[in-house]
Amino acid sequence: MTRISNNMYNYDGYVYVPRSKDDATTGFILASLASSAIMGTLPLFNKPFIKQMKKEHLNNHLYRDSLFKSLDISGLKEKGVEIIHTQFSDADLLAKDAKQIIDRDIKAGLNACYIPTQKIVKLNTEKAAISGFHELGHAMNNLKGKLSNLLQKCRYPGYSLAALMGTVALFSTPKPKDAPKDFNDYIRDNCGKIAFIGMLPTVAEEALASHRGIKLARKSGLAEPLVKNLKKFYGKALLTYTGNAIATGLAVFAAAKITEHFTRPKKVSLQSPLIQPRFYQEG
């Protein structure tokens, strides 16, 4: 590649023509639609977990006593951790924002959570005791391990990084393909991978919470067939986080490639008598 003048390129008998604003708009729309369609597959990863969660409501009595025993033997009580029972009410049907909807699902026995700032495990103990061992695992990650605590703290920065890469993916590509690359170009070229990596601390911390929760359940005396069912259940839960990471990486990758296709300058032959050469200039 030869630089003709400042930020102007000629390579192997071609000059580069900037794309039109209409191309850029088309690329932005298609990239946004493609990434939205890929992220729309997330319920498919969540469905097996929700399906089994509803079935486990009938088996709640098999896990409830072991859950509270697990809290007793974990040493978490001494660090201030509590299990807080929540119950669904008609008022929860009016939930509108994301936080209210998550709280509604917890009360309905379709979810559970550990809140580090309050040191509480929040769940419906009459329906979702099977989820509690995993949440105690989160508490152990938070209070009993430096690496696991670091993974937990990296969750939200990782989400922010993935979201930032989604924005980067929609940036136009003003340089010819063969133009020298700078740091920003490498970030953009790899934004899908970076978005995926940003989600990995969450996947790792969730897997570790399940591992510790299962160990606690076994230590509490939970029957081995129930421990095996616990592993199966938590495997489906981990699938939702793994699927989220994969879908996020693919959505960002697809958006970047589509945007690039519609915004990267076109090559025009210098030898063509039908074309008046137009040198591409950055900026």
Image (cartoon, grey):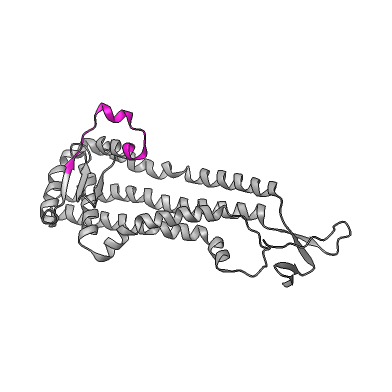
The quadrant of the rendering that contains the C terminus is bottom right
Specify whether residue 97 is painted magenta: yes
Direction right: furthest residue: 273
- Give the farthest residue toward the top: 90
Left or right: residue 161 compared with residue 117: right
Residue 177 lies, with reference to residue 254, above or below; the image says below
Residue under the point 23% across and 64% down? 145
* Residue furthest bottom in the image: 2
Residue at 26%, 44% (x, y): give it.
112
Residue 221 at least partly seen: no
Residue 54 left/right relative to 13:
left
Asked if the magenta segment contains residue 147, the reply would be no
Indicate the position of residue 159 as horizontal and vertical percent values: 40, 54
**Where's residue 138, x and y in %?**
24, 54
Q: Nearer the viewer, residue 45 or 99?
A: 99
Q: In the rendering, at what x and y percent does residue 29 appear? A: 60, 44
Pick the quarter of the image with the N terminus: bottom right
- The residue positioned 14% from the left and 51% from the top of the image is 71
**Magenta stretch?**
84-101
Q: Quadrant of residue 89?
A: top left
